[in-house]
Image (tube, rainbow, N blue to C red):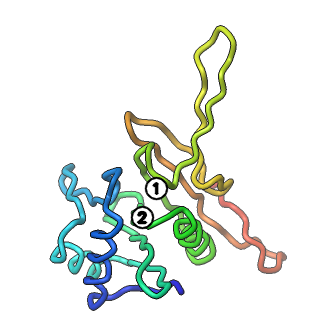
Amino acid sequence: MIERLKEKNAIDIYDLFLRVGDKTNDFFITKDQKRIYINSLKLISKILKYNEVYGLFEKELKGIFIVIREKNYRPYLKFLVDNRETARNLIKFVLWNYQEELFIKLNKENILIDKTEFRRQGKPSVIYYSLLKSKVWKFQGDRGNQVLFHKEKFIKKEGKNDNRHYSKD
């Protein structure tokens, strides 16, 4: 079951961090252009107090995502998961419950990323990145060891029943 986590869940998140670890160094926030890795109970408690954090429980906490919104910046998602299936379930939750524009920046070695390489005769190979083979999350760019994915804002068009459509504004 996916639920919003509160400050009382800080120890559950810390336990998840100790079990899973941050092998690709993606679990961080940025403050004054410096990365602050989310690896202490004190920082986790502070994040729970000021951000939206959701977790997937199956006997124990299996994965979380944090919606990080800072003034005048893009809203980012940060994930800490134990496997791809947990990640897939959390991504589905995001798609059904967040209509706003969102971004995810991940290390190229993250388990959430699918990489497809096309070899061309006599030319350099082309690598395509996707987020769990999802067509909703669009590849935006490749910067060194990281890739950026973007989900456009959903809007409801007049005269349509509960179908969702992408905004181009």
Assign the N terminus to one quadrant of the image: bottom right
Q: Is residue 156 left or right of residue 128?
A: right
Residue at the image point whose x is 57% and y is 58% from the top = 151
Q: Is residue 59 left or right of residue 50?
A: right
CA gap between label 1 and label 2 equals 9 Å
Amino acid bearing label 1: Ile
Amino acid bearing label 2: Phe
Q: Secondary structure at mark 2?
A: strand
Q: Quadrant of residue 74?
A: bottom left
Residue at the image point whose x is 38% and y is 85% from the top = 5
Q: Is residue 23 above or below residue 45?
A: above
Measuring from the top left, give residue 165's x and y in whole percent.
73, 65
The answer to the question of whether label 1 and label 2 lie on touching residues, with beta carbons closer than 8 A, is: yes
Residue receiving disc 1: 104
Q: Is residue 168 above or below residue 45?
A: above
Q: Quadrant of residue 135?
A: bottom right
Residue furthest out toward the left: 42
Residue at the image point whose x is 44% and y is 67% from the top = 82
Mark 1 vs mark 2, foreground winner is 2
Mark earlier in primary sequence (1, 2): 2
- Within 10 angstroms of label 2, few (less than 14), some, or many (20 or more) residues? many
Residue receiving disc 2: 79
39 vs 52, nearest the viewer: 39
Measuring from the top left, give residue 29's x and y in whole percent.
27, 60
67 vs 57, nearest the viewer: 57
131 vs 153, nearest the viewer: 131
